[in-house]
Image (spheres, coloured by chain):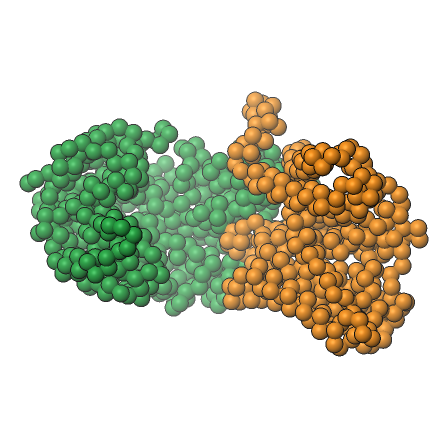
Chain colours: A orange, B green
């Protein structure tokens, strides 16, 4: 019972944040002279109105789900992996390089590409982890810096080493490697299914296994975890590797699912988007997946909104940003002892009187 | 003698608790007045009132015969009260000179007249024999020199009354001599010093008068020349032995843990162990008596594997320990109720149930396949059972353990540790902050564990608790054991004197 009520309150924060953000978005729309009801309707219609729209939204959500889960996993262990973007790109780049150079095709190629992506991402995530536990360096700074290294490394590949004629991009992967659509009439591919499966597996690992339990304990209180005999450093390193592997796998899967080639600007912003979504999802893997889909919907729908009502797409960006601000603030609010006291008072009046 | 400062009927109440009650204290010019008392006797609260950090609930403070309100540390400085805290308040990356002039309002305009300031400081340091190197950074100078900087800083800001809070705690013997020379010099220049210390030898050596505090009240003030260590210790402890309600035992048998000349961070008298040997046998409670910060923390962490010794050996159940890791110690049957229950014992944001099974999620009882799938139903019913058995007052086992009261948090830890059926139980300050009922409950559980043959190490700053519970008492002082006493009719006076290093 208590659990249900607790998850209800933690559910309330993001929902309220979204409603508040939309309210302010509506005010802006009114100020712009548009009908907010109509604009919102076209926004949602653009994202979910047709099967094609839903497909586009899920497709757009796929890389975000991976980077959001990447951030979520590291946060759960109490460390900050802001290098999701670098790990995503390094995974995509290495996956591409391996299948391209070995000329792998078909299902074998797909599996190798995604595995290589996961391993590459894991290695990229391991670097800040090792530097943190052996040298005490700040993992946030290292992981952000490695984003640039990965981006520039990808740049070397598509401008020099594996360049497609005279364009600054690589050739596309072999057509036999391109992931097929799950449902032919919809644009999303098996990479979306993979993303959701990763989310579900992560939920199981974190909440239903002893290792996940300990990992969360380490994330919440490292000192107590050490006193209770958990190998804290091993868990921190492990969380970095797995977190990086999730992003790297996402990079490879997205490469085969939609992107097909390495190109300038690929992956830009995925890392930090992922961090924000993990926070809004209250670091719960399943909630994080849903949040990523919701953000993708806001992005996809904003174009139809602009076409139908003339409200610029940047209003959608404002709404997205406000959702982040409100939910992070709301999360901080629920951490206050006053809030906990209020919650207990509201929900446990009867229980207290009974005693 | 001319009076410098007088506190009249000072009381400080926190909730229903009086940290100070009707305290009268007078300091004369040119004297060293020592405040002596156990942990929690109210010395710090009283000094915090004097330097304006706390406002007294009742009472008045007079300086030079004039009533003053001290509402901030800045005000205290203005009135000529300076304090050197036990932990120095210096900016480490800055030079000695910069630290001393920090907060100085003497310079007019926006520039600091460094040459003039330097001259003043040098004059002061010469006058009081406070030898410091003005251009060295704080990190480059010794602890003793840092203390001289603190004193110089206080004098530079015009202190007439200097409060030294356990100033000898971090010093070497030679540095202590130097400090005493400075204190004598201060006296001869008409300054007054309030000296806080637990060390009887030093107190008797340097004080003019000694005020004894107990449970927030002034017991008496005596002239140093008319007293001795034993008299002071008796006044400080101020109690006759009340008969323990528990039967004291003497046991024999193979020790569950044995320390042999264990050394850790030896040069630090307050956070180190300097050659400690002891053993704990099954079915006895060994109590460690001592003033807080004499190596108790290190002792507890060493016996639970959190830290490893630099020299010496630890034997667990007869075999020598080679790796010091809490996990190995837990596996060998060591349970730990740590000093700081929120920081070290509990995962505050996790539920009561989660905290109760914290160390045992891999067992068959709580998961399938060695931790591959948690049996949440079994975990919950186990938690319900323990909540009943250990009388943990909560609304639900899914409640975050952070939201429990201190006593109930302690019961969660105790339940977890005792249910792990240890051979050795290390409990540190088990009843700190607990009410009488919860304290009694914790004590009963410890006795019950003893009856089952668990060897228990009890470390507590509460002397009464050590007397009440222990079958054997070891006194720790500056990282060494000062003596061993039987828990049956323990000689309180001898023990209390040993606690102060005599």
Residue B60 is situated, as x and y percent measured from the top left of the image, at 21, 30
Q: In front: B283, or B269?
A: B269
From the image, which quarter does the C terminus of chain B lie in? bottom left
For image coordinates 72% across by 33% down, the residue present is: A30
Which quadrant holds residue B269?
bottom left
In the image as oriented, which residue stretches furthest toward the right? A184
Instruction: Locate residue B40, reporting x and y percent.
Output: 31, 41
Residue drawn at x 53%, y 67% is A134
Is any part of residue B84 visible from this angle?
A: no
Q: Residue B96, how many percent across, how many down? A: 27, 60
* Image: A65 above or below A305: below
- The quadrant the N terminus of chain B occupies is top left
Q: Would residue B131 be found to the left or right of residue A9 on screen?
A: left
Q: Can residue B92 be seen in this view?
A: yes
Residue in the image at 16% along x and 37% along y:
B63
Image quarter of residue B372: bottom right
B500 sits left or right of A186 in the view: left
Q: Quadrant of residue B142?
A: bottom left
Residue A49 coordinates in the image, percent (x, y)? 86, 41
């Amino acid at each position: 019972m208590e659990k249900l009520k607790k998850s209800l309150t933690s559910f309330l924060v993001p929902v309220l944040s979204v409603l508040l953000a939309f309210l302010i978005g509506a005010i802006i729309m009114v100020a712009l002279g548009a009908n907010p009801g109509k604009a919102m309707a076209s926004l949602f219609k653009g994202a979910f109105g047709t099967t094609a729209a839903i497909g586009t939204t899920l497709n757009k959500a796929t890389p975000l789900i991976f980077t959001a889960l990447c951030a979520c996993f590291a946060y759960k262990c109490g460390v900050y992996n802001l290098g999701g973007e670098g790990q995503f790109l390094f995974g995509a780049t290495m996956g591409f390089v391996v299948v391209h150079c070995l000329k792998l095709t078909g299902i074998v190629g797909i599996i190798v590409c995604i595995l290589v992506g996961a391993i590459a991402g894991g290695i990229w995530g391991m670097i800040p982890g090792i530097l943190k536990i052996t040298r005490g360096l700040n993992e946030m700074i290292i992981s952000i810096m490695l984003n640039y290294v990965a981006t520039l490394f990808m740049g070397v590949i598509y401008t020099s080493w594996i360049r497609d004629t005279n364009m600054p991009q690589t050739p596309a992967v072999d057509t036999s490697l391109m992931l097929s659509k799950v449902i032919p009439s919809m644009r999303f591919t098996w990479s979306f299914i993979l993303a959701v499966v990763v989310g579900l597996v992560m939920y199981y690992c974190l909440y239903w296994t002893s290792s996940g339990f300990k990992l969360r304990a380490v994330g919440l209180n490292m000192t107590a975890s050490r006193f209770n005999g958990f190998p804290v450093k091993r868990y921190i390193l492990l969380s970095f590797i797995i977190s990086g592997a999730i992003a790297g796998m996402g990079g490879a899967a997205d490469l085969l699912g939609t992107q097909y080639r390495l190109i300038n600007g690929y992956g830009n912003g995925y890392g930090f988007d992922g961090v924000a979504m993990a926070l809004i999802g209250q670091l719960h893997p399943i909630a994080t997946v849903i949040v990523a889909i919701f953000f993708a919907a806001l992005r996809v729908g904003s174009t139809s909104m602009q076409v139908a009502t003339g409200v610029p797409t940047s209003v959608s960006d404002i709404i997205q940003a406000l959702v982040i601000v409100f939910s992070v603030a709301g999360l901080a609010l629920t951490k206050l002892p006053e809030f906990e006291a209020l919650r207990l008072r509201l929900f446990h009046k009867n229980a207290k009187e009974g005693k | 003698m001319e009076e410098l400062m007088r506190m009249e009927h000072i009381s400080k109440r926190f909730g229903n608790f009086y940290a100070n009650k009707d305290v009268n204290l007078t300091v004369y010019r040119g004297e060293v007045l020592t405040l002596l008392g156990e942990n929690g006797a109210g010395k710090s609260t009283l000094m915090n009132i004097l330097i304006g950090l706390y406002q007294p609930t009742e009472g008045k403070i007079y300086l030079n015969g004039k009533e003053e309100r001290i509402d901030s540390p800045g005000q205290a400085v203005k009135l000529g009260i300076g304090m050197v805290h036990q932990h120095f308040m210096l900016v480490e990356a800055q030079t000695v000179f910069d630290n001393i002039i920090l907060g100085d309002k003497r310079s007019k305009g926006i520039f600091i007249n460094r040459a003039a300031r330097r001259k003043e400081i040098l004059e002061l340091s010469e006058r009081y024999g406070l030898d410091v190197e003005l251009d060295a950074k704080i990190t480059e100078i010794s602890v003793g020199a840092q203390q001289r900087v603190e004193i110089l800083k206080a004098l530079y800001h015009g202190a007439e009354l200097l409060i030294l809070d356990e100033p000898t705690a971090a010093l070497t013997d030679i540095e202590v001599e130097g400090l005493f020379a400075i204190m004598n010099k201060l006296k001869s220049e008409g300054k007054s010093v309030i000296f806080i210390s637990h060390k009887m030898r030093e107190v008797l050596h340097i004080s003019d008068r000694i005020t004894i505090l107990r449970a927030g009240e002034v017991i008496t003030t005596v002239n140093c020349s008319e007293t001795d260590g034993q008299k002071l210790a008796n006044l400080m402890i101020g109690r006759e032995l009340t008969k323990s309600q528990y039967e004291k035992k003497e046991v024999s048998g193979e020790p569950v843990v044995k320390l042999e000349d264990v050394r850790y961070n030896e040069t630090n008298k307050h956070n180190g162990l300097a050659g400690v040997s002891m053993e704990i046998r099954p079915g006895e409670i060994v109590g460690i008596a001592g003033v807080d910060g004499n190596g108790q923390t290190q002792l507890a962490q060493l016996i639970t594997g959190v830290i490893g010794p630099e020299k010496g050996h630890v034997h667990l159940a007869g075999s020598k320990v080679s790796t010091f890791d809490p996990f190995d110690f837990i596996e060998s049957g060591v349970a730990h109720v740590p000093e700081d229950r929120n920081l070290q014992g509990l995962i505050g944001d996790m539920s009561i149930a989660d905290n109760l099974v914290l160390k045992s999620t891999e067992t068959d009882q709580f998961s399938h396949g060695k931790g591959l799938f948690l049996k949440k139903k079994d975990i919950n019913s186990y938690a319900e059972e323990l909540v009943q058995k250990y009388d943990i007052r909560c609304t639900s086992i899914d409640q975050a353990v952070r939201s429990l009261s201190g006593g109930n948090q302690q019961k969660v830890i105790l339940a977890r540790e005792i249910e792990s059926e240890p051979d050795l139980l290390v409990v540190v300050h088990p009843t700190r902050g607990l009410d009488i009922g919860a304290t009694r409950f914790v004590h009963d559980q410890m006795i019950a564990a003893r009856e089952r043959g668990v060897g228990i190490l009890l470390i507590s700053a509460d002397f009464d608790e050590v007397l009440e519970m222990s079958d054997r008492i070891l006194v720790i002082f500056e990282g060494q054991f000062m003596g061993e006493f039987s828990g049956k009719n323990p000689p309180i006076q001898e023990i209390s004197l040993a606690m102060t290093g005599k």
